[in-house]
Amino acid sequence: MSSESSKKRKPKVIRSDGTPTEGKRNRSDTEQEGKYYSEEAEVDLRDPGRDYELYKYTCQELQRLMAEIQDLKSRGGKDVAIEIEERRIQSCVHFMTLKKLNRLAHIRLKKGRDQTHEAKQKVDAYHLQLQNLLYEVMHLQKEITKCLEFKSKHEEIDLVSLEEFYKEAPPDISKAEVTMGDPHQQTLARLDWELEQRKRLAEKYRECLSNKEKILKEIEVKKEYLSSLQPRLNSIMQASLPVQEYLFMPFDQAHKQYETARHLPPPLYVLFVQATAYGQACDKMLSVAIEGSVDEAKALFKPPEDSQDDESDSDAEEEQTTKRRRPTLGVQLDDKRKEMLKRHPLSVMLDLKCKDDSVLHLTFYYLMNLNIMTVKAKVTTTTELITPISAGDLLSPDSVLSCLYPGDHGKKTPNPANQYQFDKVGILTLRDYVLDLGHPYLWVQKLGGLHFPKEQPQQTVIADHSLSASHMETTMKLLKTRVQSRLALHKQFASLEHGIVPVTSDCQYLFPAKVVSRLVKWVTIPHEDYMELHFTKDIVEAGLAGDTNLYYMALIERGTAKLQAAVVLNPGYSSIPPIFRLSLNWKGEKTNSNDDNIRAMESEVNVCYKELCGPRPSHQLLTNQLQRLCVLLDVYLETESHDDSVEGPKEFPQEKMCLRLFRGPSRMKPFKYNHPQGFFSHR
Amino acid sequence: MERAVPLAVPLGQTEVFQALQRLHMTIFSQSVSPCGKFLAAGNNYGQIAIFSLSAALSSEAKEESKKPMVTFQAHDGPIYSMVSTERHLLSAGDGEVKAWLWVEVLKKGCKELWHRQPPYRTSLEVPEINALLLVPKENSLILAGGDCQLHTMDLETGTFTRALRGHTDYIHCLALRERSPEVLSGGEDGTVRLWDLRMAKEVQTIEVYKHEECSRPQNGRWIGCLATDSDWMVCGGGPALTLWHLRSSTPTTVFPMRAPQKHVTFYQDLILSAGQGCCVNQWQLSGELKAQVPGSSPGLLSLCLNQQPAAPECKVLTAAGNSCRVDVFTNLGYRAFSLSF
């Protein structure tokens, strides 16, 4: 009970606090008697138990009084009021007692609380002190452990072992007698010795450095000397060039070429090696050179840093362009195409010199992403060529090398794998880019050692030297023959356009002395026109009129007779003969379908062409064939049997000497010319 | 490093040459084997090709069946005429006649059995032999051609027994009149002459070009083809194709065909003819054109009917001419397919 607890504490508190308040009270009482009344002091004096009893008693009294009042009020009467009043006054007195008691109780409570509070504060203070001390203890403990754990730097130093130390250290440092016993001193000594040693070594190091400097300087000097030597050697080499040329040993030039050749991609390298070897061994008229930028070639082979730079550059560029406008899909595709068709910066140039001093310039390129080689060709002659109209296509760079080997038209890529690459960027065929990139002929691939099988695409096609070598000689020979025959044709066409069939003197024996029929027209006709002619259908059906051929129309006339000849010139002229188809306009139109003799004439020039080849390299084939056609027309017209029903003489009197005019079931005319007798007979 | 030997002739050249040869080939003559299963064709390059008719006509015929079984170089010059006996194939062209055994010919690398050259008058140019005719009664062969004579050769001994002269220009064709026996020959001079073999003399001459009904001076007067059926003869060439009654030497029917005909034959009750123009013409004896069946060559030079009794399934008409193809007609109404050199 609170009163009991306050009772317990009270004596202490009273002792400590009571006296000052009593003292105060006493003083105040003595000074001002009854000025004020301190209830608090009274609380100390009274006994809470007795106050409690008083309270109980008061309450009882009150209850009794109330009951009496009640009785009196219920009873009623005159003197009740005075009784009631009396009791009321007593109740009031009791009420006031209760109030006092209440006040006293409050005061007691407050006092109790104050005392508790003070005590608590004290306890708290002690508690705090305890905490502080504990904390300090902990701190000190930590410090102690730290001190105990302290490792001084000297323990990290790898000191030499004890025996070594005692062996090597001089006695003034080692101080054996002192250190042996005392580990601290020992360690100190050892550290001393370490320091000593290090100092010595540092000294040595400095000496060595200075030595090195000296030597480096010497080296510099010597290098200077050597480098001053280099330009002198160069000048000597320059001076020796004329000597090299004089002795036909262009080592210097060759050396430079080999240097550049190192940067060539493998197929071009194979081509370069094989062509140089061939040129040295077999054909002095072949010269090989490398063109293009070596730096660009080197730049191709620096992947990481360069690509990073490129990326950052391209990012920057891209940002710029996106600010302006986004590149359209078409432009992007275009770029991808350009990327796919990119050429290696280096190219190999071959110059084939022919006997008549005309030169065939071949430039070989390598398309890196497609792994094929292409070639561009140009023919130059010593004298300026005036191109006749019909000879436009003969030497044009696009078609001069077409079908060097049968069927090799160079319009399609030879690498089957390229088709898949093309599909990604929307390229239909390489034909559209051929003028720019060069032609990817099959022989070019073979010269570069690239062998593409016909069926499936191979994973990697590597450049192979043996393939190149085996084709080099044949291809070079074919190239030369091709250039020669084209140039010969060029000259012949110039003459044919003027109506003169140029027959060389060594081919004159094939023809009689007098040829009356004349060539009046020689023009080139487009492929489609040839296909439209009615008398060439069988050639077209036999597959001999492809689009790689060149087509011409010749017109031979004599009197009223006009002979039209449609000519198919195969790019492989002159090993592949030109093919003629005739249509004679004289007394009606005669072609091979309605006149057996026209058929025989065609047979004479087409099938029996080998006699007309002339001396090798048979460039005279075409002109001889044309001359023979003139002779055949003469024979045909002159041997035509006279129609008895028609009046008048024959238009063409017979001047040719013939044994018999007709022979065989087809009644052939004598078309075969016999030399030197000069008469005509049948085959 | 091994080097491949460079080719002397690039492949393209031979292919082109072969194609040109085929384009300019003319098949002049055909002959059926005695067993009826094979057909021999001779062309202007002197080659003979043997086709297997039974294989080409069979139901599982493939493209290769239409190619020759064997092709060999028989003569140096064109082969204008071929006939077959019981066992031999006789071919003639530039001046000589060669004989081949049919059983040997089917194998590769066949060699001729014999070759004979009739005695010619001129030596400047070797005359060609345009027609061969077998006379079974005498077992002899008649050759005629460039030297304007008919030579008779005995097949047993190989000697030349007769030389019948009379034509003024070279002889195109021959026909045999079984009954007499008489031989008809037509030539470049425009005449058809009848020869009696026993008497070795000319008995009748018909100058076709002099008859107005059939003469066509713009084509010339030459007689290119001849066929006879005892009393009747049909001939054509420069003049129009005409049916003649031999005894009276009068033309009875003129067939209205503008193009000169190169081969004519009697077949059952029809006359088949072929010549310039790609068609095989079928005529009634009255002169009407029954049918015109186009072939594949622009002009035809020879017709051959396979009537050998041993192979009735190969009974076909074959036509060849100015191309490398032989057209096969199983039914006279249309061209079934073509064999090709």
Image: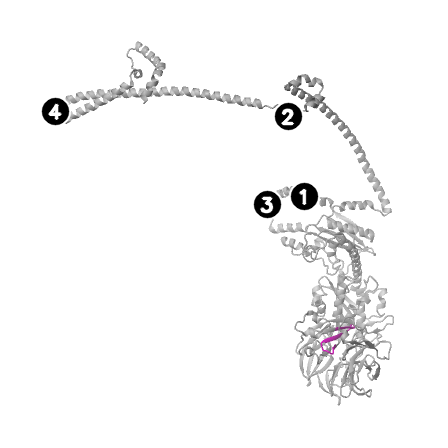
Q: Nearer the viewer, residue B52 or A558?
A: B52
Which element carries disc 2, helix, strand or loop?
A: loop
Asked if the residue at tag 2 contacts the one at tag 4, i.e. Cβ–Cβ closer than 8 Å, the answer is no
Sequence order check, earlier mark of 4 and 2: 4
* Residue ID for mark 2: A156
Which percent across, then down, holds residue A18?
34, 14
Sequence order check, earlier mark of 3 and 4: 4
Sequence order check, earlier mark of 1 and 3: 1
Q: Is residue A409 above or below residue B217?
A: above
Q: Are marks 1 and 3 on the same chain?
A: yes
Q: Does the image show residue A309?
A: yes
Q: Is residue A173 above or below residue A298?
A: above
Which element carries disc 4, helix, strand or loop?
A: loop
* Residue ID for mark 1: A303
Q: Residues within 10 Å of mark 2 (few under 14, many from 20)?
A: few
Furthest residue toward left: A78
Which percent across, then down, holds residue A103?
29, 20
Nearer to us: label 1 or label 3:
1
Which element carries disc 1, helix, strand or loop?
A: loop
Q: Which residues are magenta?
A: B31-49
Name the quadrant containing residue A214.
Answer: top right
Q: Chain of mark 2?
A: A
The CA distance from mark 4 to mark 2 is: 118 Å
Q: Chain of mark 4?
A: A
Q: Are marks 2 and 3 on the same chain?
A: yes
Q: Residues within 10 Å of mark 1 (few under 14, many from 20)?
A: few
